Amino acid sequence: MKDAYEKALEILPQSKATFVIGATDNIAIGVMRAAHELQIEIPDQLSLAGFGGYEITEAVYPRITTVHYPFQESGELAAKILMELILEKEVDLIQTLDNELLIRESTQKNA
């Protein structure tokens, strides 16, 4: 979060970006803090989203759009696959988990 905040303070003033998506929700929160300090209005001037679905995205304003990712299920699946590989069982090369896009106030549609 701190690194994202510092980098955003450096990059946002010279950027023409209208949308930033952080690899994690914590990165998005760091960018949000920098945007606030730079008086960049979210979502009017900059839409913002994160990835992870952390509860903190509900506690800030505007609430941050995020992709909810099932971390617990992902870890359990990874452990299961690892055990199968150790036991020399065949596993599918491609594994998928459902994600959910939670659209909130930090993003807006452009007309």
Image: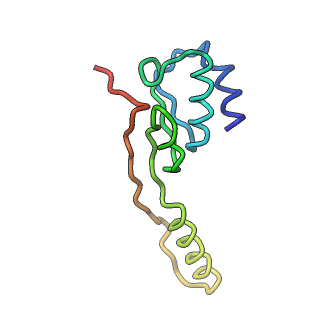
Percent x, y of residue 13 = 61, 14
Q: Quadrant of the C terminus?
A: top left
What residue do we see at 45% from left, 27% from top? 47
Q: Position of residue 74 (x, y in %)?
A: 53, 65
Relative to 87, does residue 39 appear above or below in the rendering?
A: above
The residue under the point 65% across, 82% down is 86
> 8 and 93: which one is in front?
8
Nearest to the observer: residue 79 or residue 62: 62
Query: Residue at coordinates 67% horizontally, 21% vertically from top-left?
Result: 9
Closest to the observer, 62 or 28: 62
- Quick check: 108 above or below 59? above
Residue 52's x, y, as percent? 52, 50
- In x, y percent, where is residue 39? 56, 15
Locate residue 24: give its quadrant.
top right
Image quadrant for the N terminus?
Answer: top right
Q: In the orientation shown, which residue stands out farthest toward the top?
A: 14
